[in-house]
Amino acid sequence: MSILLFKSHRQMTDEELMHRTSRGSDSAFEELYRRYARRLQGFFFRQLGGDDEAASDFTHDVFLRVYEARDSYVESNNVATWFFTIAYNLCKNTYRHNEHVATFLATLDDEPLSDEDVEVRLTREQQRDAVRKVLMSLPPPVHLLFSLHYEEGLTIPQIAQIEHLSEAAVKSRLFRTMSIIRQKLASI
């Protein structure tokens, strides 16, 4: 018998829970829902312009997709990355019709940058509020990228995997986004 059998669901890692879910455990899936639903709903709320109903619908759609694909889960995959890949793709599909977004994003991919150029720490609540206001004025994929990294805590490699970009392109986009935010904050 595995030690996994004696752990409560709250003590299990996300990956252990997903393994159990793939084996038919609804209670393991419920624990994943408990861990991620609120976080995903907040993510969607920010990305969808504060539309609480859409955020709720998208959150449920993520879990529906995960549940339907539970049998195909690859145990070496990070569960958070998988959930946010689905969430990212749902957002991306809603933005797809905006032609100006593609043009804007193309200007963000000039050259790779170092990790030091990308990392910016927000230290005060006023700065965070001002940044959120500035982000809402930018095209949705720009604040989506920012949100994945700075608000959801995903790493550059995880974001690169989600967006199907090179790590250099993610770093470049994050740097350009932070430059735009700094410029807009300076004018406030």
Image (spheres, helix red, strand yellow):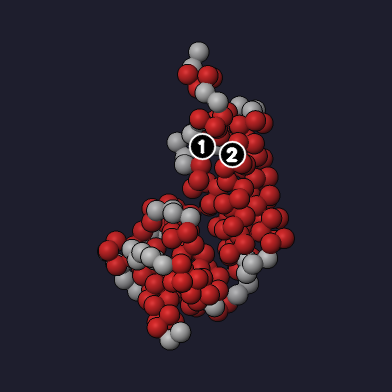
Relative horizontal placement of residue 118, taking residue 76 as reference (left or right): left
Above or below residue 27? Residue 46 is: below
Q: CA distance from mark 1 to mark 2?
A: 7 Å
- Where residue 40 appears, as percent x and y from the top left, is 59, 53
Q: Which residue is mark 2?
A: 32
Assess disc 1: are there few (<14), some (14-19) or many (≥20) residues with their C-alpha within 10 Å of its C-alpha. many
- Where residue 43 appears, as percent x and y from the top left, is 57, 58
Decide which of tag 1 and tag 2 comes sooner along the chain: 1
Q: Secondary structure at mark 2?
A: helix
- Where residue 131 appears, as percent x and y from the top left, is 47, 72
Where residue 140 is drawn, which disc sits there?
A: none
Q: Quadrant of residue 120?
A: bottom left
Report the residue at 55% width, 70% height from top. Answer: 140
Relative horizontal placement of residue 155, taking residue 99 as reference (left or right): left
The amino acid sitting under disc 1 is Asp
Q: Which residue is mark 1?
A: 14
Is there CB contact under 8 Å for labels 1 and 2? yes
